[in-house]
Amino acid sequence: MTRRIRQRFFLISAAALALCFVWGYADLPPFGHVSSSYANIVNAISVPQRHITDAVTAVNFDVRGFDTLGEEFILFTSVLGVILLMRRTKDEPAGDHEDKAPGRKVPPVSDAVRVTTLLLMAPTILFGWYIVVHGQVTPGGGFQGGVILSSAPLLLYLCGSYPKFRGAAAPRLIEIAEALGAAGYILIGGACVALGGLFLENLLPLGTTGTLTSGGMVPFINLGVGLEVSGGFTLILLVYLEELMEEKE
Amino acid sequence: MIVLQALILMFVAAAGTAVVFTRDPTSQAIVVSFYGLLLGIMFFVFQAPDVALSQIVVGAIALPLMIMLALARVKKQSRKAQK
């Protein structure tokens, strides 16, 4: 394909795309004045009916909790897929966990980096859990907090070495945490059915609006999701780094 | 507020273009991280803090990291093939 044909092809496609864009955008509600009926309903019910001040959490973990279960398992399956693809096969010997890729100069970690990452570690873990447990009060929740939590072991990798990271990350424990988190969501839903309600129906007392214990089941689901997400992300990092470190010369 | 929104929209447009025009995959991963951070700020300015949090952790940290790790893996593979 010559340059000219490619250019023409691009121009025609770009023009068609621009046309569709304008056509699609013409019918959007005016900027800054969006007020769909769904948004109004959610805003109206999330505090009085669920005692949840963060409407997004109310929708995600209560109103459409079943959909979020699916979302959580998208992540679970993709983590599983990555682990399956990257697993060590029998003819690949276990490495000595040292970064010795040729042609890559690895400078020693400076004291400044070590101190900074170590100082950041505790605040990161605290902040991660804060975001997880305050899901029903302020923006955030299991997904966001979980990813923040999984960045804590990564800090250890940055400041030290891979063996230390691996030691602290404890793959077996993390696998269990991830599985527990994923199973927890279904178990909570199943418990509702066992108690005579619907799947994921909010049966627990709703508590006082604006406190950690508000929202009935939502904080528990968030805890499960937080475990699952932080475990999943840490596992992905582990298998990737494992793969890179095990370069046997 | 409107000024802030217009400003961040322009920054996002510029950063998006920068991502496309960066040809080296490794530097692209860094640029895409910066772009992810800008997107997070944009969501925050448009009053969607939940999405902003997810965007910052996934777009600015997790995605570039995965790209870098995958690139390192690919490079390792091609080195092995050369031997």
Image (cartoon, coloured by chain):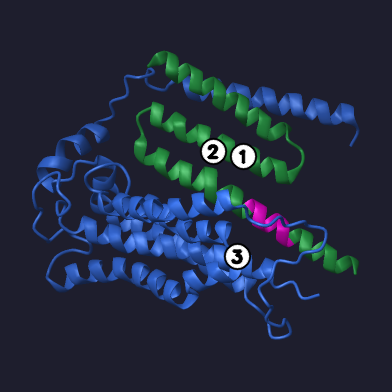
Chain colours: A blue, B green
Determine the residue located farthest toward the top in the rendered image. Answer: B3
Q: Chain of mark 1?
A: B
Q: Chain of mark 2?
A: B
Displayed quadrant of residue A175: bottom left
Near-viewer residue (A23 or A179) = A179
Q: Which mark is residue B32?
A: 1
Q: Secondary structure at mark 1?
A: helix
Tell me which amino acid carries mark 2: Gly
Residue at 72% from the left image edge and 81% from the top image edge: A92
Q: Main secondary structure of the magenta part?
A: helix
Q: Secondary structure at mark 2?
A: helix
- Marks 2, 3: nearer the viewer: 3
Residue at 90% from the left image edge and 69% from the top image edge: B83
Residue at 75% from the left image edge and 67% from the top image edge: A100
Tell me which amino acid carries mark 3: Ser
Q: Is residue A127 above or below residue A24?
A: below
Q: Secondary structure at mark 3?
A: loop
Cα separation, mark 3 vs mark 1, equals 26 Å
The magenta stretch spans residue A31: no
Range shown magenta: B67-73
Near-viewer residue (A86 or A9) = A86
Residue at 12% from the left image edge and 71% from the top image edge: A195
